[in-house]
Image (cartoon, helix red, strand yellow):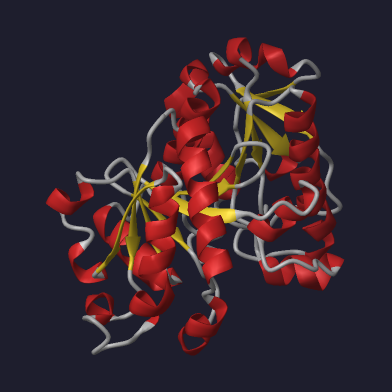
Amino acid sequence: MAPIALTCGEPAGVGPEIAVRAWRELRSDCPFVWIGDPRHLPPGTPFETLDDVFGAAAISQRALPVVAHPFAGEAVPGVPDPANAQGVIDVIERAVAMVNAGTASSICTAPIHKKALIDGAGFAYPGHTEFLGALAGGAQAVMMLACDELRVVPTTVHVALADVPRALTPELLRRTIEITADALRTRFGLPAPRIAVAGLNPHAGESGAMGREELDWIAPLLAQMRAEGHGLSGPHSADTLFHSRARAGYDAAVCMYHDQALIPIKTIDFDRGVNVTLGLPFIRTSPDHGTAFDIAGTGRANPGSLIAALRLAHRMARS
């Protein structure tokens, strides 16, 4: 199988050092190639540049396999340089080209710093997900957060809480559920996925006493989709959806807004949560944390989320 393409992300952040620590733990068990400027790797890192990425597994036994991509500047930990912004963007595009060509099985992206990309290259996207959707021809991308105990999908993401009821539409919820169900079948190997859907309001509206969205259109939409063959339950009261017995009854939970989805998964497994982008024509995972400029270069960054992201990309590619 082709290796995973791991993008370097923001070179002044923790991305380079956790990539090296992930390689030391995974070696050839989960082959990946790091795409970036070798000057940005921690001093003393054993690496080998390669032209044929299918040799990555053999090289991984002794060194970090690197697809070299020159950047305009050096990297000072904790201090993003706008001169490197275009390089960060180009590396993401290069990873997409590799997976489209079949020379990479999937993409794993290290964290980027959006302000540095805007300042240095006029980056026009809110983040990785939207940029990857554009590179995939305008595909509607859906964010899943996953760990061993839970998978959650927020229907609305970076939207102010006051704006969620307007942003949340039957069309958006239907499409989010459909993309989630398709990914569970094709990427996670679950032929009959079970999806639990949270309500929008406290106690899922409590029969209209705390909000009418559940009565007016959420429950009817779920009933219609169940009749179409989807394995759905809900709308559930979110405060009882994430304890261990409840989690045993579904494969993924579709939530209505950002914190409803992210609080439970970050409580259950803060260090090993993985961001998975659904709806793309290729597999993309990412660690569920940022650039961590405050600890970059200190050796204190936890590579657990990146390791989990690489392992999940490998399992999804095998599925």
Q: Left or right of 52: which side holds 16?
A: left
Q: Left or right of 18: which side holds 113?
A: right
Q: Is residue 208 above or below residue 7?
A: below
Q: Is residue 234 above or below residue 206?
A: above
**Which of the pair 29/292 is nearer the observer?**
29
Q: Is residue 101 above or below residue 198?
A: above
The percent coordinates of residue 47 (x first, y second) are: 65, 25
**Which of the pair 109/302 is nearer the observer?**
109
Q: Left or right of 207: which side holds 75?
A: right
The percent coordinates of residue 315 (x first, y second) are: 46, 27
Residue at image coords 29%, 52%: 269
Q: Quadrant of residue 81 in the image?
A: bottom right
**Which of the pair 252/271 is nearer the observer?**
252
**Which of the pair 158/118 is nearer the observer?**
158
Q: Quadrant of residue 53 in the image?
A: top right
Residue 300 seen anywhere in this rendered image of the structure? no
Q: Is residue 108 above or below residue 165?
A: above
For the image, the number of numbered tags is: 0
Q: Quadrant of the N terminus?
A: top right
Residue at image coords 40%, 70%: 218
Residue at image coords 21%, 46%: 249
Residue 83 seen anywhere in this rendered image of the structure? yes
Q: Quadrant of residue 141 in the image?
A: bottom right
Residue at image coords 81%, 19%: 51
Q: Left or right of 206: which side holds 291?
A: right
The percent coordinates of residue 210 (x first, y second) are: 27, 88
